[in-house]
Image: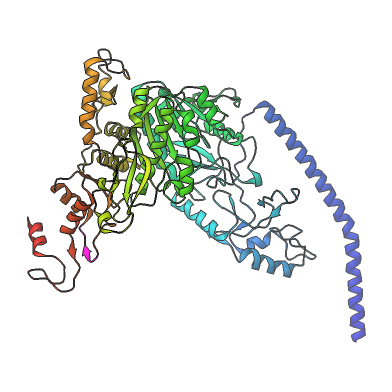
Amino acid sequence: MAELKEGNSEQLHQEDANIKAVEDPLQMEAASEKESKQVSVNEATSTEAVKSEDSQLQTPTSTGSERHVSIQTTLEGLEILVDLNGAGRKSCPLCPEEKFKACYSHKLRRHLQNLHWKVYVEFEGQRMCICHLPCRQMKNSLGSDQSQARLVAHYHCVVCSVTIARKTDMISHLKRHVNKGETEASYSGTSDVSFEDMVPGGQAYEIMKELGTNVQLMPNHSTPQKTDTYFNRKMKTNRQLVFCSLAVLAEERSPLECLDAFGATGIMGLQWAKHLRNAVKVTINDINEACVKMIKENCHLNHIRADGGRTPRQPEGAGDSDTPIATVEVSKMDANVIMHLRAFDYIHLDPFGTAVNYLDAAFRNVRNLGIVSVTSTDTGSLYSKSLNVTLRHYGCQIVRTEYYRELAARMVVASIARAAARCNKGIEVLLAVALEHFVLVVVRVLRGPTQADESAKKLRQLLHCQWCEERVFLKPGSMVEENLYRQLPCQCHGSMPGKTAVELGPLWSGSLFNTGFLRRMLVAAVQHSMEDIQPLVKTLICEADCTTLKSFSVTGHSVLANQVECGVVIKTLQKVEEADTADQSGKRKTGEESSNVVKKLKSDASLEHPAFYYSIHRHSIRGMNMPKLNKFLQYLTEAGFRVSRTHFDPTGVRTDATLEQFKSVLTKYSVPTYSSAPPGGTQGHGITTEDTAHKTD
């Protein structure tokens, strides 16, 4: 019986083999016919696409709504990609042939479950499995073979189709989408503007909207080393401050020729053109070809005409909706070259790192009473982390102090003042902001050697005590003093051995703010609905006046008075109605009127905000509970000192009091931390009778 069963099984096996041998040629013929039909269909579609491109140049790209095969909802959906019930060897749909060879169904099922499905990332019911296909390739080094690229395992984002290698990075990437309200249903990674080239690896562009302006972003836009079109979302405050300063200048004269020397994605120049329209003539420059191409695409995305190069032809029969709302000139040139060749009213410098290499060219042709805004992002050298780099770039000797951010702002202003003086120009600082990621300085340019000399006189050395951190600018003059410690208000040198102070600088010793300009910036921020920077501008106004009073009137069109800056009358909104009878804006006063203005400026020099600030936590007394910051500001005001908060430090206090006077007021109103009640005090609360009497008053 066993021999009969073996014989029957062998016969059945032989019959199956014969049937397969007969069916294989038929299947091969059917497959070949199917492939030939597919090729003919592809050729037909390609010819039709070529004809459509010839007839109409500007056509939208595919919507890209199809998800990647690695994004599934269940494991069964991943297994459906391969017919695991069929016989024979199967290939993995998420791995190349050279990485995972074809195998039988039971082994492929374990491979899909243990390698791809086990490490998925879930987002709103969609599971992104890890993919090993050649969607993302690692760049080879210069010494390796350029013909071969190393494949990298990665995930495909379900929202924006970006490929990310690490699982933790993908989770953080999805959290950013959630924080911005971008989900699969409300967010699209494609745009209505046609692209000449697709992103490498089939990745889609990301559309970002800021201040009513849409820009396309590359997948690696936040990493300067991986992309040329760098974009930083954290610089939104910087872009809005620069926009408000340009809007204020546009009220004084029109039209303005303004330059964004480092365009990158072009978002800053596009915001200028889209909101200020005919009041400005915007030029966006960048030396990189990819950036210039991206800027032109972003211009078409915002219905802005881009000059300075070949632009796509508009389709026939286009309506009024396709007409450009503004015109922007896009140039591909070195920033130093374009600033040497042309004159501008407003120049913004925002390179990656320090801007000292472009200051000489910026002041070469900038017009009189124009504005130069400089953004420095080299916080390592500015915030006293790389002292040797600071000495090379800015020529300043500094140390780490409690007021390091204002030290950085004054160091940048000093570099700007020296560059302007080399071109026989002076400056007046309108705004200086130092935050976590950048230092922004906005200055007005005043032509003439006299103005240059006045600005150069404000560059002084700073004497800093390393024991108590008291500081004072050295008195101007070339005579050598026997003992510089006499200029310090503290007595640390007499009580401490050795040298107790260091000489820092040269730094800018003048004012860092202009109150009238900041008030007009606040009006511009309200008009253009910039709620993010309004609290910051209000803090700057209080800091410029060195006061805690917060009275801001931004309604109406004639609430602002004329501004007199360095003997120059600046026309504002109130002066527009009287333009026919008054002097022309920007002209210098002559005769007695000019001398009166100079005398007034000298008398008001004492009303400038005091230099630097003190941190209330840095100088708190050990074992004492110090008062709240707002109450402490009130105590300093009652003591007869000028006082205000500062944007440089949330716990900082800008005051004209010395450090000794500052500490005395702080000690007077601090309460000891003790467990037992003092005589006449309240049990367990650490409040003396003097404080209770003060509270009842």
Is residue 529 something that shows in the picture? no
Q: Residue furthest front?
A: 482
Q: Nearer the viewer, residue 513 or 663?
A: 663
Quadrant for residue 40, please give it.
top right
Is residue 391 something that shows in the picture? yes
Coordinates of residue 688 in the picture (x, y in percent): 11, 65
Residue at 56% from the left image edge and 33% from the top image edge: 297
Magenta span: helix, strand or loop, mainly? loop
Compared across the picture, whether 626 is left or right of 35 comes to: left
Coordinates of residue 667 in the picture (x, y in percent): 18, 59
Figure quadrant of the N terminus: bottom right
Q: Residue furthest bottom?
A: 1
Figure quadrant of the C terminus: bottom left
Q: Is residue 333 above or below residue 216?
A: above
Please state the extent of the stretch shown in magenta in the rendering: 622-627
Q: Nearer the viewer, residue 229 or 659?
A: 659
Quadrant for residue 587, please give it.
top left
Q: Is residue 469 above or below residue 415?
A: below
